Amino acid sequence: MSVIKLQGVVPEIFASNQNLHSDIWLQDVAFEQGKRYLIEADSGTGKSSLLSFLYGQRGDYRGDILFNDQDIRTLNSRDWSVVRQSVLSILFQDLKLFGELTALENVQIKNRLTKSQNDRIIKAWFEELGIADKLKTRIDHMSYGQQQRVALIRALCQPFNFLLLDEPISHLDDRNADVMRDIILREASRQGAAVIATSIGKHMNIDYDKRLSL
């Protein structure tokens, strides 16, 4: 898959709103593989909903979302399984980590499915992100910013054409935000992938190809 197209998409909850001013909702928009996008939004304008639509978690929208030229509403559960293991990766705003597992175990759950990264690379990311001492720490004993970094490592443990990031640095200081950015850009460039990041204020310092207002 090399392009994601949105054609007249709007969440059902906003469908009756006659005063929408958005670069995405009710517009024709294309996200192309290999490019960098920032979606800037106010709280409550649907940024997490948008990524949930793209990831196939929710279908409460009007309009069409196409992967290349295929309407995603035609994808079955097996199709989505393939997409989520090899085409789309996501860092959720609420992270969706398993609190009773350690940081490393949360990453290994995914990497054992995809066999995408080796232990040396994973541990190097932990080191680079300043959480090497947290490998065996339960997630629910870590700060939210530390958890965000674990969630990123997990998101990178698969092949992808598009990396979806929902407020990825909301709880990080500038230094760790820059480290996260550098890792993301390296891995996205290695895979020739697009980065689609959302923000309600604080965002990664990237030379974006396009900025869109939700």
Image (cartoon, grey):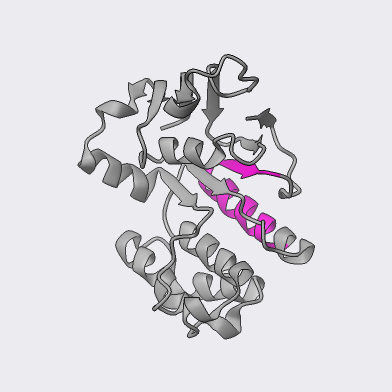
Residue drawn at the location 44% of the way across and 79% of the way down: 102
- Residue 169 placement: quadrant: bottom right
Residue drawn at the location 59% of the way across and 39% of the way down: 44
Give whichever of 89, 116 is nearer the camera: 89
- Give the image location of residue 90, x and y in percent: 47, 50
Left or right: 211 as drawn, with respect to 142: right
Question: Relative to 169, is 143 above or below?
Answer: below
Is residue 195 covered in magenta? Answer: yes
Is residue 182 covered in magenta? Answer: yes
The stretch in magenta equals 179-200
Residue drawn at the location 54% of the way across and 29% of the way down: 32
Question: Relative to 166, is 118 above or below?
Answer: below
Q: Can residue 114 be seen?
A: yes
Left or right: 27 as drawn, with respect to 88: right
Residue drawn at the location 67% of the way across and 29% of the way down: 213
- Give the image location of residue 93, x and y in percent: 54, 53
- Give the image location of residue 86, x and y in percent: 37, 47
Count of marks overlaid on the render: 0
- Residue 176 placement: quadrant: bottom right
Q: Quadrant of the N terminus?
A: top left
Give whichever of 13, 29 is nearer the camera: 13
Q: Quadrant of the C terminus?
A: top right
- Give the image location of residue 88, x and y in percent: 42, 44
Question: Relative to 53, is 68 above or below?
Answer: above
Give whichever of 122, 175 is nearer the camera: 175
Q: Can residue 67 be seen?
A: no
